[in-house]
């Protein structure tokens, strides 16, 4: 194998890895990568007595957007929301697409109340920058370590998901912190 073959092989491996951790539509991290990073952040926070928050977010009435305007516009909504989330999060935050119209965030060194403020900024940013002829909102749920007494990182996702569904029940377009 010559140097050019080795370089080509390394480049292909790097591109393959990048595709495995990045959602092709939104450019956000994939669920698989997010869960890997969640375990790492959980272990880091435990070891160094740190904190972090997990946010679950879901686009309100997204099925209606797809049914009314089509999947192409639905894809544009997903890209727009991804852009807004990147705008209002730090480079150290992990922002991922959990599935369909669900998004998930890890906010290192962030307590739940501060995470809720980040969610409010994202929500207000979505409304202020909305380029569509229809309203787009999201419902958010927040859980945190060590504030929520959990033993496994997946429990934080479950708690954030429960809080997000409370936001939906409250009328959508809001943030609920798990208590």
Image: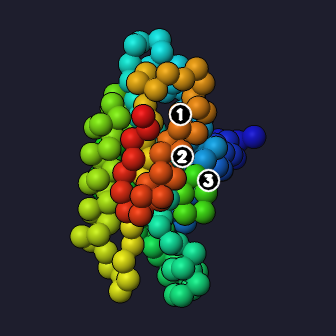
- Determine whether label 3 and label 1 are within 8 Å by CB: no
Please name the residue shown 37% across and 62% down the image: 173
Residue 73 in sight from this viewpoint:
yes
Q: In which quarter of the image is the C terminus?
A: top left
Q: Mark 2 points at which residue?
A: 161
Q: How far apart are marks 3 and 1 (CA)?
A: 26 Å
Furthest-front residue in this view: 170
**Image-quadrant location for residue 38:** top right
Please name the residue shown 61% across and 33% down the image: 154
Q: Is mark 1 on a helix, strand or loop?
A: helix
N-terminal-most mark, 3 or 1: 3
Q: Mark 3 points at which residue?
A: 19
Q: Is mark 2 on a helix, strand or loop?
A: helix
Vertical placement of 149 versus 36: above or below?
above
- In the rendered image, residue 33, in percent from the top left (x then y), is placed at 59, 42
Q: What element carries label 3?
A: helix
Q: Nearer the viewer, mark 3 or mark 2?
A: 2
| Badge number at residue 156 | 1
Q: Which of marks 3 and 1 is in front?
A: 1
Q: How far apart are marks 1 and 2 (CA)?
A: 8 Å
């Amino acid at each position: 194998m010559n140097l050019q073959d080795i370089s080509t092989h390394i480049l292909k491996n790097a591109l393959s890895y990048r595709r495995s951790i990045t959602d092709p539509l939104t450019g956000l991290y994939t669920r698989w990568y997010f869960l890997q990073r969640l375990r790492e952040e959980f272990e880091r926070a435990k070891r160094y007595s740190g904190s972090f928050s997990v946010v679950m977010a879901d686009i309100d009435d997204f099925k209606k957007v797809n049914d009314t305007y089509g999947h192409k516009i639905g894809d544009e909504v997903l890209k727009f929301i991804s852009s807004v989330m990147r705008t209002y999060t730090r480079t150290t935050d992990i922002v991922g697409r959990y599935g369909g119209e669900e998004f998930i965030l890890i906010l290192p060194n962030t307590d739940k109340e501060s995470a809720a403020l980040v969610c409010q900024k994202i929500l207000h940013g979505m409304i202020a920058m909305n380029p569509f002829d229809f309203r787009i909102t999201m419902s958010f749920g927040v859980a945190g370590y060590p504030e929520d007494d959990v033993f496994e990182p997946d429990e934080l996702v479950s708690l954030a998901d429960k809080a997000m569904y409370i936001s939906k029940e409250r009328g959508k377009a809001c943030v609920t912190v798990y208590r």
